[in-house]
Image (tube, grey):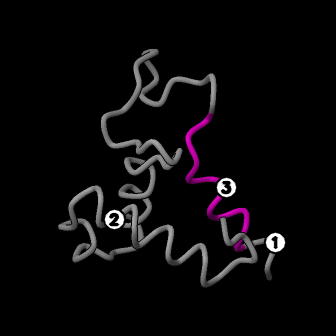
Amino acid sequence: MLAAQERFFADLQRDSGLPLDGAGRGDANATEAGLDLTRFRRWLREAGWSEALALEDADLAQVLEQARALYTEDRA
């Protein structure tokens, strides 16, 4: 179970060295912490959690980091 949780958050990290938008440009929704918020928003939309899509990027990133701290052993 923990491995699946780690994988979920790892999949939401920016791919270092890979373009975020498929055209070689960085994504404005990716934070300095390495989160790909565009990818996370896509997941939220597919999961049907439309309320979360209204959050500002900084708030959404904070929610994601808090969830990672709560649901994995990665406390960094």
Q: Position of residue 38 (x, y in %)?
A: 37, 47
**Residue drawn where x is 33% and y is 75% of the image:** 48
Residue positioned 38% across, 55% down in the render: 42
Q: Which residue is mark 1?
A: 3
Q: Is the residue 71 above or below the residue 64 in the image?
A: below
Which comes before the other along the chain, label 1 or label 3? 1
The residue beneath circle 2 is: 60
Q: Who's the residue at 50% across and 68% down the image?
A: 65
| Label 1, label 3: how far apart the Cα atoms are | 10 Å
Q: Amino acid at mark 1?
A: Ala
Q: Amino acid at mark 2?
A: Leu
Q: Looking at the picture, how far across and down is residue 74, in whole percent?
A: 72, 70
Query: Can you tell which quarter of the image residue 49 is in?
Result: bottom left
Q: Which residue is mark 3?
A: 10
Q: Earlier along the polypeptide chain: callout 3 or callout 2?
A: 3
Q: Is residue 1 above or below residue 47?
A: below
Q: Residues within 10 Å of mark 2 (few under 14, many from 20)?
A: some
Q: Nearer the viewer, mark 1 or mark 2?
A: 2
In the image shown, does 75 or 9 lie closer to the viewer? 75
Residue type (three-letter) at the residue carrying disc 3: Ala
- Label 2 sits on a secondary structure element that is helix
Element marked by disc 3: helix
Range drawn in magenta: 5-15
Residue drawn at 24 percent across, 65 percent down:
53
Question: Residue 9 colored magenta?
Answer: yes
N-terminal label among 1 and 2: 1
